[in-house]
Amino acid sequence: MSDPIRSTNNQAKPVIVQLFAKAAEITGTRQITLQLSGEETVGTLFRKIAINHPELSELKASLRFAVNHEFSDDTRRLHPGDEIALIPPVSGG
Amino acid sequence: MSDPIRSTNNQAKPVIVQLFAKAAEITGTRQITLQLSGEETVGTLFRKIAINHPELSELKASLRFAVNHEFSDDTRRLHPGDEIALIPPVSGG
Amino acid sequence: MGRLIKITDGPISIDEGLRQVAYHSNGGIVTFTGSTRSSTKDKKVKYLFYDAYVPMARSEMAKIADFIAETFEVRDIAMVHRIGKVPIGETSVLVATAAPHRAEAFKACRYAIDTLKNTVPIWKKEFFEDGEVWVGNTPSEKPKHA
Amino acid sequence: MGRLIKITDGPISIDEGLRQVAYHSNGGIVTFTGSTRSSTKDKKVKYLFYDAYVPMARSEMAKIADFIAETFEVRDIAMVHRIGKVPIGETSVLVATAAPHRAEAFKACRYAIDTLKNTVPIWKKEFFEDGEVWVGNTPSEKPKHA
């Protein structure tokens, strides 16, 4: 998994945040690309997004998060290139 | 249900015994027509049939009976015109 | 209450069963379909034959449907059994239950197929290369069809 | 182990789901199909729209299938979810489980649909004559789809 060429560019590689359903609708966007600034977790990243998209605050209590297609805690440490998703309450079926 | 014309002929109206699956196969017949002789029950009728079809004795322990499409005890009293069935262990599905 | 109770000597249409119960299906439909593939461990089944006491089988199936309608919050039920010769792998029985709450649909479907296998006068015979046997829980043989 | 995990923007073929699990189906196949008819008591739903996080939804469905294979005596499973616009009454989800013993097939099917509704990132929106709403168990709204 380690890629010596990419790892030298780690600071430059952004994370991608995916938004779905109500989260996509109220923010008007399905994808946000962000640069990590130092040691960030899912929680700190979400707060950063919520500054630009305050509509997300009302969803906060019901949101779950995923990192690289796995449900994750908001204390999870993020790495360059991670794919984060905001998961409103699911209603498949 | 009482039919004055028929009831005068009650003694003449036979009962019909239906046989299925293994019971039909070992006796070589699917239907037996019999005249009731006085006060008969499912049990006495079965014994009468088993005299002519001794192959049925080996099935006896596993057989259930039905009278007029309802599962019935072998103590059930029979009436002219009844339809009796010998029900081997069912295996639908 | 939509209801389909049927004994047929041709292939079972799963679509027909589902259509019959789909009308009120806000929630879900649970379907059980049974077929026999190669039944026993050591003996290859060539095909099956089902005998039935048709009028009583229909009446027993209707009793199951009545009980389900009274007991579970199930609005629609289909029960179809095939009789006569049935090729290996083809559906011999279909039960479908539709309910607003899926828990009820699951319970009703399970109840229906369990009860059908105990009370409905239908009999299965397995044909092997070298013989044939009526399936039934007599001491010497156990039902193959779980 | 036969397995079908699929997210599709077209109609769900129940036959395809059943074919996928029918190979080992000596015993039975239990199928759950979900559709929405006119959802709420007072509001008429015109149609539905499903959004999905497709790669993660596939991966969560595969986890359910893995768990079932480890936990129940189920040999084959199909899980299909439709996304995009879905007309009222059409199937939005199909789960089919095949097992030698029907008790296991019932348990596995029930587990799969219950878990799918809790963990798979798919979202349903109901469109009414005069509005639209994302279904989800936030305090103000409860899932309509039992």
Image (cartoon, coloured by chain):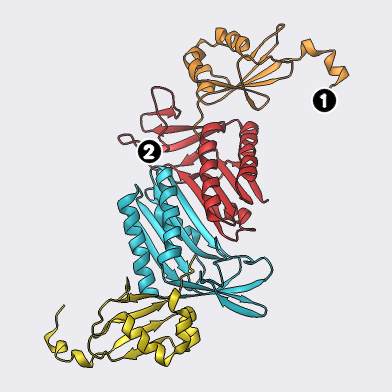
Chain colours: A orange, B yellow, C cyan, D red
Which chain's residue wears label 2? D
Which residue is at 70% across, 10% downward? A36
Q: Secondary structure at mark 1?
A: loop
Q: What amino acid is at disc 1?
A: Met
Read off the residue under disc 2: D39
> Based on the displayed image, in which of its 4 quarters is residue B81 positioned?
bottom left
Viewer-proximal residue, A88 or D103?
Answer: D103
Q: Residues within 10 Å of mark 1 (few under 14, many from 20)?
A: few
Q: Secondary structure at mark 2?
A: loop
Using the image, determine if residue B49 lies above or below residue C116. Answer: below
Front of the two marks 1 and 2: 1
Read off the residue under disc 1: A1
Which residue is at 61% across, 43% downward? D71
Using the image, determine if residue B51 lies above or below residue A63. Answer: below
Q: What amino acid is at disc 2?
A: Ser
Q: Residues within 10 Å of mark 2 (few under 14, many from 20)?
A: some
Please state, as top left, top right, bottom left or bottom right, where the C terminus of chain D lies in the image. Answer: top left
